Image (tube, helix red, strand yellow):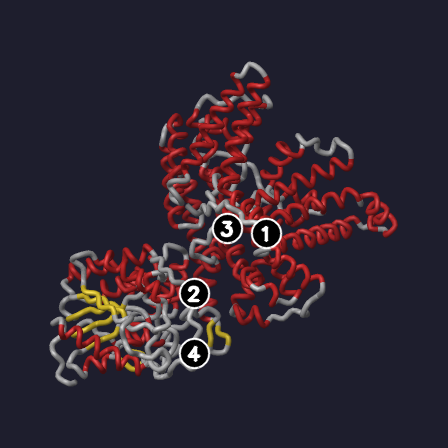
Amino acid sequence: MRRLIINAVLLLGTFTVLYLAVFTLLVKVRRGDVPLVHHVSETLPWKGGATWRKFQEFDPAQRWDVVVVGSSHAYRGYDPALFAARGSRMFNLGTSAQAPSNSIDIIRAYLNAENTGLLILDVFETPMRNDGVEGVTDLTRNVASDAVAFRQALSLRDPRAINMLALRWLTRNDPPTYLDDDYIGAGFSRRTDSVPAPIQYINPGTFEPDPQQVRALKGIINLCRDRSIPLVLACHPMPHQGDHLAHARFLELMDEWRGPEGPLFLDFATGHDLHDMHHFYDHNHLNQAGVERYVPVLLDSLEALGLLPRGAAR
Amino acid sequence: MLFNSFEFAVFFPLVAAAYFLLPHRWRWLLLLLASYGFYMAWRVEYAVLLLVSTLVDFTAARGIAKARDPKGRRHWLWLSIAVNLGLLGTFKYFDFINGNLRALAAWGGMDWPVADLDMVLPMGISFYTFQTMSYTIDVYRGHMEPTRHLGRFALFVTFFPQLVAGPIERAPNLLPQFLKRIGLDPTLVTSGLKLMLWGFVKKVVVADRVSLVVDHIYAQPGEMDWTTLVLGGVLFGVQAYCDFSGYSDIAIGAARVLGIRLMRNFRTPYLSASIAEFWTRWHISLNAWFRDYVYIPLGGNRVTAGRWYFNLLVVFFISGLWHGAGWTYVLFGVLHGVYLVAAIHSRPFWVRFNAVSGLTHLPRFHHALRVAATFGLVTFSWFFFRAEDIGDTITIVERVSTFAHGPLDTASLFTAFKPGILAVTLVLGFGLLLFDHRIEELVHGTRPLSKAMDLLFHATLLVLLVLFGNYGEVAFMYFQF
């Protein structure tokens, strides 16, 4: 037994030295301006961009009337300026492909009853059937909190976590490699372009949620309840040619997941008069024209429900 | 449960620790419970099939031993074969046969009234039914006495390291090992873990990386030039080998940690100098099964030439069908049968040709030529194995044989993959092809290294596993068989 333990320790020691040597070499050796390794997955290769900037900007010590979390629907669909116009300070902590399994660690690390008046979680079919890997990659690379990065990496439960954390650690003092021109501030990224031509919508008509995301969504509901953070779930408009069958199934399941005592769920996916080409920049993301139509409707609902004070400006 | 999952990373050390802590008399029970747990982590309800197979074959073997006349013995044997092939036929082949009958009826202008069953293929059914059938046949032939211990027999059928993808073990090898008192042997544990590590590298680093390129090429074979299709064939050969032999290595390594020896399932098959040799190095346990339970009972090669050819074609037809319920698999099997028949039939010609050409005076060069030719033939057969359907197979063969759209148009690959990732993938794939035999020597200890070099070698494998592994629980290819 002693021999086994010695062998294991020797192997792990040698592996650690070798791994760090190779990884450092890959990160520090550059081809032009680009290091040989600058990402650990196919998505979100670079340190920097909207996620990096928003977590640098976000101050948990300040009080926010509204905080938004969620995926690209969230960080491109909820404009803080429109909230400010109605008298509410809002910060957008949405990040690329952020699924509930990613959101929960952000909430845990950054939000509480003191700094968050109302938490809006933008949720729809895609994040609920997502494996969360893209969100993990983005967060371990760019989130300011080491605790979130660590927890997110470990949530993968495979060796990619080692690479992600090593990359974060070895590049922690490097400047961001890009800034993202769409980023406006307060966590919001703006797109002003529209769908350039009619899109071929692919609608499988089915919705199979990922069990991990269902657990995480329920976890968020419990966490907000424990921390006394008012929570609203919202789904922003979907194009008229979107997958309505899948959405209907999603709505059924949402009722089940929230439970009878659960948080409010505001579904704006359908029943709107937005135009599939003019108010969207692709097959499911609102552009700024769409955001300017959607957010006032959302705010009207929140004010009518007493979740936000009646706005000053109209 | 997949070997390449977090669950297994927790499950296996716990089972191994409990195994060595328990007294010998209870270990079979622990392994049996662990094996059922391992299987039921995938699907609970299909454990019933394991149970049925176990109970039927245990009873049949006992019945054979007790039967007073050959007729009674035969009845028990056929019960075992019928139940096992019935399970296999129902779950694996029913829809395939039914679909073909429907197509035939439609061709004849008739409706086919039978609906498909549309059932999920039980994981490992092709493996455990063959393993448990071999037990009944061995008892029938008098090669062994039936076991009286239902629990240990159930463990023989379900032993988790090799339950879902082999090696297909034989009762005379595995059953007695469950009776042996096994102590914690650091040498065995270390070598088992090293073998598991190499298996993981083959699976997660090579097979799962290479599969991304292979999938891209085979998704639209009609869009690919002939050289890309050849590259796809070669890479699929690497993928299939690394995926399956990787699984076998993990299985053999895991069993070795527990002090149980399983048979070796692969021996550097791509170094074979003939198709016949290839089948003695590739999926050894399956081919030994076909040899002992199908080929030899048919008469093997101790018959007329025509009958011998027939026997080979039958065995490889069944072998193709065993791999999957589809015509592409059948064609793959039949093609290998044809290769073997052609090799036997043309042997006198090759003997004369080698003598006249002087190749017999250049043995190493001659051997290298034969290895290359064998590799080419096997690669050609992978087109049949990997293609989605017969239509794709025809497309691939046609494009390759007419040198369509050459030379290599890398645009499609570079559009789909980042150059760096593609380069790493190709280096890993071809690196394995070139150096597999050397690494196998190191892993299996036939070329011993100094302690320091051994440590460095395995640390390097670990670095490869962490840095270049393709993660996300990619199932093993052979689970579908």
Q: Residue B109 carries which label?
A: 1
- Between disc 2 and disc 4, whose residue precedes? 2
Seen in the picture, residue B162 relative to B28 is either above or below; the reply is below
List the residue tagged with mark 4: A198
| Image marks 3 and 4: residues in contact by CB distance under 8 Å | no
Q: Does residue B195 show up?
A: no
Q: Which of B179 and B403 is in front in this view?
A: B403
Local secondary structure at mark 4: loop
List the residue tagged with mark 2: A40
Judged by depth in the image, the label closer to the viewer, 1 or 3, is 1
Q: How crowded is mark 1: few (under 14 residues within 10 Å), some or many (20 or more)?
A: few
Amino acid on which the number 2 mark rests in the picture: Val
Q: How crowded is mark 4: few (under 14 residues within 10 Å), some or many (20 or more)?
A: few
Amino acid on which the number 3 mark rests in the picture: His
The alpha-carbon separation of the residues under discs 1 and 4 comes to: 42 Å
The alpha-carbon separation of the residues under discs 2 and 4 comes to: 35 Å
Judged by depth in the image, the label closer to the viewer, 3 or 4, is 4
Q: Which residue is farthest right?
A: B356
List the residue tagged with mark 3: B458
